[in-house]
Amino acid sequence: MLPVIYGCEGLKLTKDEQYFFNKAQPLGFILFERNCQSPEQVKALIEQLKACVDHRNVPILIDQEGGRVVRLKPPHWLPRPAAKTFRSAKAVYDNALSMAQELLELGINVNCAPCADLLIEGADDIIGDRAFSKDPDKVTKYSLAMLKGLEDGGITAVIKHLPGHGRAPVDSHEELPVVDTNYAILRQTDFVPFKELASASKEAWGMTAHVIYSDIDAENVATHSSIVIESIIRKEIGFKGFLVSDCLTMKALTGTFEEKAKKALLAGCDTVLMCKGTIAEYEEVARGCRF
């Protein structure tokens, strides 16, 4: 089994995708809006994806946070508000439980949420209203509610973006964010929600941030930093669960896809995420996962 989670192009698999996935045997798959037209179609696509691999309990991921980051939309699925708009932990829990029921009905078993990053004034808007609050305690309380709602509904949550993306001055999809805040402040603020979430669940996954924290490792983004993963995510924060990289296509990362995948795994990620690309790029990632 290859430690990679792939996306696919459309509403059903192409013959080339089927052939490649059958040959590569990836761990799992991730769905996007381009893959989700109706409940019946999504269920059929998931069956196609699962049929490509020999292992059971295939992780089928989606980013269904709410607000700007939703892949399942009306009229077939309920509208989901942005994190920043919630006014109580109960409302967060109820929304997450309802969301989990929708996902499970389709055959999706992993949701890339909650976003436990802080809302930081002056930072890039890539997190923005995806964060529950600027207050670490409120982010902790609401993120825990979302985590519990998803898990009570039978869905594996993915805590993101470890160890904190809220301060990023630029969008990691487009360029490399460097956070210069010192370690002592990060411990008292950004890391706080992640610590609580890490101790609250033994089932949740975690997702790394493509962000450099210059006071910890000035050379590598968290995804590619054994220092950040081992010293901060695993020890300081205490996250012991399954760790997935953010997507390898994001421009914060440099190098070939083979190099990006290999570096993430060597740094301590358990699997890498490749959301979109050509078959040739998918093959590059597969080579990076075999070493």
Image (spheres, rainbow, N blue to C red):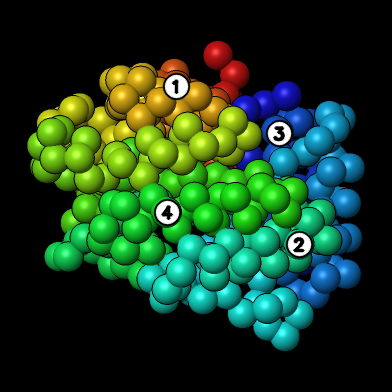
What is the distance, in whole Å, between disc 1 and disc 4 at their CAs? 28 Å
Q: Which residue is mark 3?
A: 26
**The N terminus lies in quadrant:** top right
Q: Mark 2 is on which residue type?
A: Gln
User: In this orientation, which residue lies closer to the viewer: 41 or 288?
Assistant: 41
Circle 1 crowding by C-alpha within 10 Å: few under 14, some 14–19, many from 20:
many
Residue 202 percent coordinates (x, y): 59, 30
Q: Mark 1 is on which residue type?
A: Gly
User: In this orientation, which residue lies closer to the viewer: 288 or 66?
Assistant: 66
Q: Which residue is mark 1?
A: 268
**The C terminus lies in quadrant:** top right
On screen, residue 174 versus residue 8, left or right, reads: left
Q: Which residue is mark 2?
A: 101
Between disc 1 and disc 4, the foreground one is: 4
Between disc 3 and disc 1, the foreground one is: 1
What is the distance, in whole Å, between disc 3 and disc 1 at their CAs? 18 Å
What is the distance, in whole Å, between disc 4 and disc 3 at their CAs? 35 Å
Quarter of the image for residue 64 reads bottom right
Between disc 3 and disc 2, the foreground one is: 2
What is the distance, in whole Å, between disc 2 and disc 4 at their CAs? 22 Å
